Structure formats: C-alpha cells, structure tokens
Amino acid sequence: MTSYAQTPIDRLLSGADSALRTLFATPRASRACPTLANEPSELNADEKAHSGALMRVNHVGEVCAQALYTAQALATGNAALRRHFLEASEEETDHLAWTRQRLDELGSRPSLLNPLWYAGAFGLGLLAGRFGDKVSLGFVVETERQVEAHLQNHMQQLPAADHASRAIVAQMKDDEARHARSAQDAGALPMPSPVRALMRGAARIMTSVAHRI
C-alpha cells in the first residue's frame, strides 16, 4: 500500500521509483485479468499480429497513464487530491499488467519508445498541475474520455475471436469512464476546445507510431 503522507523528497523518490517500475519491471495486477476461461482465443498469424499491434498501443496508453498520474500527484499540494491520483495510478497498474501479459501471449512486444512516451506524459502531467488542481482534474477528465473512445474503437477493430483481448479492453474502458467521473466529481474544470484538439492530435500521433514501433 502506498503511503500518501510524504515529504517533497519522498514524493520525488516515489516518482522516480514509479518510472523505473513502469518502464523496466514486470507489472503486478491487484485484480485478476478479466479473461474468460470458457472462451479461448484461437487466432491465426495475421489476427495475432493485428491484436498484438492494438494491444501494444493500449499498453503505451497505460505507460502514459502511470506517468500522468505520478506527475499530477507530485505537482499538487493537496494531500487528498494526491491520494486520489495515486489510487487511480494503482488501478491503472492493473491495466499495465494485463496489457503486458496479453502482449506476451500474442507473441508481441511493448513499444520500443516507451521511455519517450513516459517522459512526454510526465511533462504534460506536471504542466497540468502547475495550472492548479481543478485544471489538473480537468486534464484527467478529458484524457480519460478520449481513452474511453479510443478503447471503444479498438473493441470494433479487434478480431471477433480474440476474446481475451476484448475482455481486457472492455474492463479497461469501464475503469477509464469511472476515473473520468471521479475527477469530474472532484471539481474538474472543462478543458478549452483548442486544448482538447491538441490532446486528440497528440494521441493520434502516439497511436500511429506505437502501432508499429
């Protein structure tokens, strides 16, 4: 269990530890992977490759989620909000573990650019935090809503026979929607239209590159 009563130095060390664990350690989920034992996924080579590319993108999204929540927890001076961000990060660790496990099962690999994705997302989280807690929460709401839409799109793209990946993505989608609602209830400010558009553009670049690299 993470301790939320931390000094600034503690938070910096915790942030560094989170980065190292996200990028270089095998993630461990606190919840069982939501796959269905009675619905095995029997895929041909092309379907495995397609699912692997999609799940690699989803894994990158979870790497970025770890970075965002860690940075936002570091940026806020509100202990309750820090706890909110870190608890969300812990739940996102389940997603990180599930997507990594599924990549291994599909014979695929994580993105080679994960350190870059992490660094970029961490910087955005710090920037959002500098504008105040309500803006930081608004950034969470918009991020999670865009992720939810992205996961819905992947549900349509995944092979019909890939029951394992589809079950993981469906659970992730439900969790992301709940995270958005929690941030909204905590007092989030809506993001301006130009900011939302920039976020969508950056997400398109990330997903396009991560699909291949």
Image: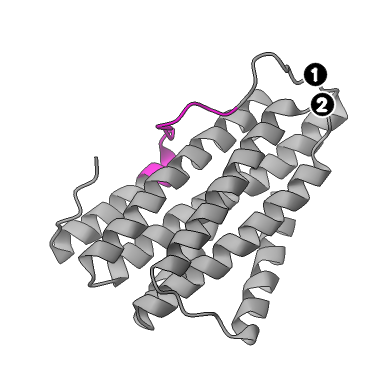
Circles 2, 1 touching at the beta carbon (< 8 Å): yes
Dominant SS of magenta comes to loop
Q: Position of residue 22 (x, y in %)?
A: 42, 45
Q: Position of residue 20 (x, y in %)?
A: 36, 46
**Rendered residue at 35%/76% (across/down):** 133
Queried whether the magenta region covers residue 33, the answer comes back as yes
N-terminal label among 2 and 1: 1
**Rendered residue at 37%/42% (across/down):** 21
**Rendered residue at 38%/72% (across/down):** 126
Q: Position of residue 98 (x, y in %)?
A: 54, 33
Q: Is residue 158 left or right of residue 56?
A: right
Q: Which residue is mark 1?
A: 42
Structural distance between the alpha carbons of marks 2 and 1? 6 Å
Q: Which residue is mark 2?
A: 161
Taking depth in this image into account, of 174 and 113 the one nearest to the observer is: 174
The magenta stretch is 21-34
Queried whether the magenta region covers residue 37, the answer comes back as no
**Residue 10 quadrant:** bottom left
Badge 1: how crowded within 10 Å, few (<14), some, or many (20+)?
A: few
Q: Which part of the image, by quadrant, shows the N terminus?
A: top left
Taking depth in this image into account, of 32 and 18 the one nearest to the observer is: 32
Q: Which residue in the rendered view is the most extreme toward the front?
A: 185
Q: Position of residue 60 (x, y in %)?
A: 58, 50
Q: Given the image, on which type of amino acid does mark 1 rest? A: Glu
**Residue 50 quadrant:** top right
